[in-house]
Image (cartoon, grey):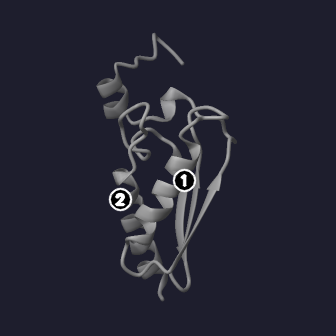
Amino acid sequence: MTVEATDALAGQVREALRLVIDPELGDNIVELGLVYYVAVAEGGVAHIVMTTTTRGCPATAYLKDGARDSAWAVPGIEFVDVALTYEPPWTPEMMTAAARLRLGITDGGGW
């Protein structure tokens, strides 16, 4: 598999992750800034590093499983590794501007 092919697959995985909706915020994990890293290695192994809005989030297992299942649905993905991290800690400024607007979150003049 070429670098271009693995990069293309990583892009497809990132797009597939948009199908995972945070049940508390009602928006997808990509727009919410919960996905920190997506890469695909040789053999179709997808690596995803993500976070949750808070430690102890009750939706953690749901979000991790959703990320795994969405990535696995991408043709060419043979295995998915989802790692959870809290470094750096998530903040609302990690969200896309569109997601902040949809949720009515403003920076109040500075984060």
- Disc 1 packing (10 Å; few <14; some 14–19; many ≥20): many
Q: Amino acid at mark 2?
A: Glu
Image quadrant where one finds the C terminus: top right
Q: Position of residue 59 (x, y in %)?
A: 53, 40
The answer to which of 47 and 4 lies nearer the viewer is 47
**Side of 17 where 94 appears, left or right:** right
Q: Are marks 1 and 2 in contact (CB under 8 Å)?
A: no
* Residue reaching furthest to the bottom: 1
Q: Nearer the viewer, residue 64 or 96?
A: 64
Nearer to me, 102 or 26: 26
The percent coordinates of residue 101 (x first, y second) are 31, 25
What's the mark number on residue 84?
none
Identified at 51% across, 43% down, the residue is 34
**Residue occupying the far top of the picture:** 108
In this picture, is 25 found above or below 110?
below
Other-residue count near label 2 (Cα within 10 Å), few / some / many at <14 / 14–19 / ≥20: some
Above or below — where is 102 with respect to 50? above
Look at the numbered disc 2 and give the secondary structure of its residue: helix
The part of the image, by quadrant, that contains residue 7 is: bottom left
Vertical relation: 80 (above or below) 99: below
Residue 110 located left or right of residue 56:
left
Residue 27 percent across, percent down from the top left: 36, 38
- Tag 1: amino acid: Lys
For discs 1 and 2, the disc positioned in front in the rendered view: 1
Residue at which label 2 appears: 15
| Image-quadrant location for residue 52 | top right
Q: Which label number is shown at residue 64?
A: 1
Location of residue 21 by image quarter:
top left
Query: What whole-number distance in Å separates the C-alpha atoms at marks 1 and 2?
Result: 16 Å
Mark 1 vs 2, N-terminal side: 2
